[in-house]
Image (spheres, rainbow, N blue to C red):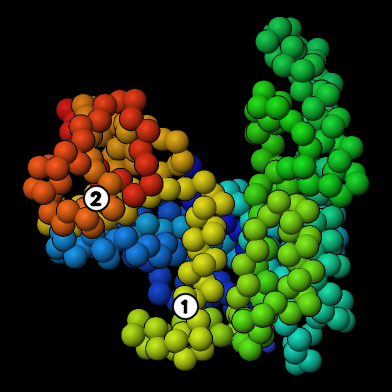
Amino acid sequence: MQLNCGIVGLPNVGKSTIFSALTSAPAEAANYPFCTIEPNVGIVHVPDKRLGQITEYIIPKKIIPAVVEFVDIAGLVKGASKGEGLGNKFLGHIRQVGAIVHVVRCFEDDDVVHVDGKVDPASDIETISIELAFADLETVQKRQENLVRLKKSNDKKISERAKATEPVLILLEEALEEGIPARRVDLDERQAEMIADLHLITMKKQLYCCNVGDDELEKDNDHVKTVRALAQKDGSGVVVISGQLESEISDLDSSEEKAAFLKAAGLEESGLDQLIREAYGMLGLHTYFTAGEKEVRAWTFPNGAKAPQAAGIIHTDFEHGFIRAETYHCTDLFEYKTELKLKENGRLRVEGKEYVVADGDVLHFRFNV
Ligand SMILES: Nc1nc2c(ncn2[C@@H]2O[C@H](COP(=O)(O)OP(=O)(O)O)[C@@H](O)[C@H]2O)c(=O)[nH]1
Ligand SMILES: [Mg+2]
């Protein structure tokens, strides 16, 4: 399960502005031992109204939201795949993330220099896409060189596998040479598995984040329209935010002030909240809850996880010693208000090892140690 998104884009498009706003109220790292602690990594709470709603009925001492990590990846410029700028360092960072947020400059401001002299989202996106494709091309070609040796291996398993991988690499090479991302190459499950360990950058899902002026949120400007058209071709999502506005909001102290500010600007929620939720979804992540007097907590699990695996996210003992899960859905709690009423109305279920956990389940695990 990967919890992190890399923020990429050309220099001066607003990546660091957005990253700072995202991490202005940092999550308490101690609650999330699986998170990375590095200067360019931010641990960010996932906004989830259900968490607050649960605590209306089950009042805890502590509330702990789910988190997702954002990584500010600097150094992507034309030629990065050939080692320009921070080239190689940048590529190392980006191979490790689960998905990509691609920030595109859609604001005009003569005071902020554009690396190519003018605001042009289509050209910016192409520059970045080509660098990423070329970086992957190099990875693929390196693997092809290794295959020459592996094919001759005395270990039959290794040589057979190398032979089977060869045509897949050729398909990828052909696409990447044209600047086509690997995710658009039609591979079946078995083929995709063969090249999974290459961690190709252009195989990762990506989301475009259009950075617009603070007065351009209501209606798409022409730059945003361009990005939407490109995203549609690519099957990628789009979020429109104003980095400058988000940075002002994040400077406010209380959530009341923030809410008032949003209301005055005619917005329902901050663009960052939308970005965080989209990123969480793009990573294939879902949330279940544990709820008691000590704490009400949101836990992140990968879509499709069964009860023992979901339990293992709290502690490996919960997974190994899993007996059963007692569960109800949070919307049932909102309807029946108490766990007793849930029980009386047959909404409290007992589930076993094969249960596929649903987003929004409230779970209580029984286990042996
Ligand atoms: N006008 C305007 N300027 C912005 C916006 N977002 C960022 N900037 C400015 O653009 C410059 C570059 O931003 P930065 O976040 O450092 O870009 P990065 O190189 O992509 O990390 C800074 O001077 C920011 O203040 C925005 O939404 N509107
Ligand atoms: Mg920066």
In depth, the one of 338 and 103 nearer the eye is 338
Numbered disc 1: secondary structure = loop
Upstream in the sequence, badge 2 or badge 1? 1
The amino acid type found where label 2 is placed reads Asp
Instruction: Give the side of residue 330 with respect to residue 78, left or right.
Output: left
> What residue do we see at 37% from left, 57% from top?
66
Visible residue check, residue 83: no
In front: 179, or 26? 179
Left or right: 314, with 147 as reference point = left
State the residue at coordinates (83%, 24%): 167
Pointer 2: residues within 10 angstroms few (<14), some, or many (20+)? some
Kindly identify which residue carries mark 1.
268
For label 2, being within 8 Å of ligand 1 is answered no
Mark number for residue 31? none
Q: Which of marks 2 and 1 is in front?
A: 2
Disc 1 crowd rating (10 Å Cα; few below 14, some 14-19, many 20+) is few
Can you see residue 43? yes
Position of the C terminus, as image quadrant, is top left
The secondary element bearing badge 2 is classed as: helix
Residue 82, position as x, y percentages in the image: 85, 54
Tell me the kind of residue under disc 1. Glu
Decide if residue 252 is on the left or right side of residue 65: right
Q: Mark 2 points at which residue?
A: 332
